[in-house]
Image: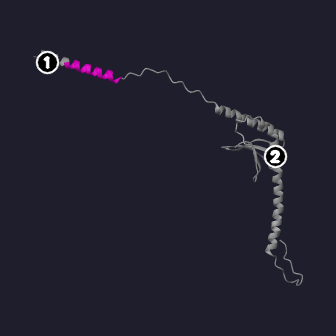
Amino acid sequence: MSEPETSGTHPSQLRPVRLRDALLRARIEAADRTGVVVDLRDAEVARLEILNDALDPLFAQIPEQIDLFDRGISQGDTPRLWIDVVAHIMMGRDKRMYRFVQDTRFGRIVLAESHDTTAIVDAVTDYVARRMIEREHAMVVPPEPQAPAAEQPARSRVWPFVFGFILGAAALFGVAMLAVLRSW
């Protein structure tokens, strides 16, 4: 902390530090720090734009009907070069290293990390190829199962039972009638 300043007329009297002056000094210091942060962010965006330009030939080869990829640079607190919805490239902690990551349901995984743009372009090329193959597999429609040949309907087992029951009852009735007629 600084010592309170004294006025020039009375050396024994302390001149109060004005809050307005302190706020002005604090704003100037914050602007200096913010300027450094903005410069770092601008450098990150510039490096991501260089990588984005290096990826142009790759994305030019992707057929128009495949809309899996939506490449673009987002400028937030952490600038990112998005490849698709789940994969992006951001700068590492040293702000010179590219970090190619993919978000999964189990967390974020690092697919590639390098200072060299060609290594990252190769990793993105491999990723794009894998995603296109996954799309092809997802788009394949399995053949519909063939309907089984029409089988003859299963015969009911109730009617033979009923017929046998009636026939048995008639036979018993006939035997009972014969027994009654003989006993007379």
Q: Position of residue 159 (x, y in %)?
A: 32, 22
Q: Is residue 119 visible?
A: yes
Q: Is residue 168 magenta?
A: yes
- Badge number at residue 9: none
Task: Assign the magenta stretch its main secondary structure.
Answer: helix
> For the point 81% across and 66% down, which residue is it?
27
Compared to residue 14, the image places residue 76 above or below, namely above
Q: Position of residue 46 (x, y in %)?
A: 83, 48
Q: Position of residue 118 (x, y in %)?
A: 83, 39
Q: Which residue is mark 1?
A: 180
> For the point 18% across and 19% down, which residue is it?
176
Q: Nearer the viewer, mark 1 or mark 2?
A: 2
> For the point 31% across and 22% down, which residue is it?
161
In the image, what residue type sits under mark 2?
Glu
- Sequence-wise, the earlier of marks 1 and 2 is 2
Q: Is residue 30 magenta?
A: no
Q: CA distance from mark 1 to mark 2?
A: 113 Å
Residue 86 appears in which quarter of the rendering? Answer: top right
Left or right, 11 with respect to 52, comes to right
Q: Is residue 95 visible?
A: no
- The part of the chain drawn in magenta is 157-173
Question: Across the whole image, how many numbered discs are drawn on residues?
Answer: 2
- Badge number at residue 49: 2
Q: Residue furthest right?
A: 8
Q: Residues within 10 Å of mark 1 (few under 14, many from 20)?
A: few
Residue 132 appears in which quarter of the rendering? Answer: top right
Q: Position of residue 3 (x, y in %)?
A: 85, 75
In the image, what residue type sits under mark 1?
Val
Q: Quadrant of the C terminus?
A: top left
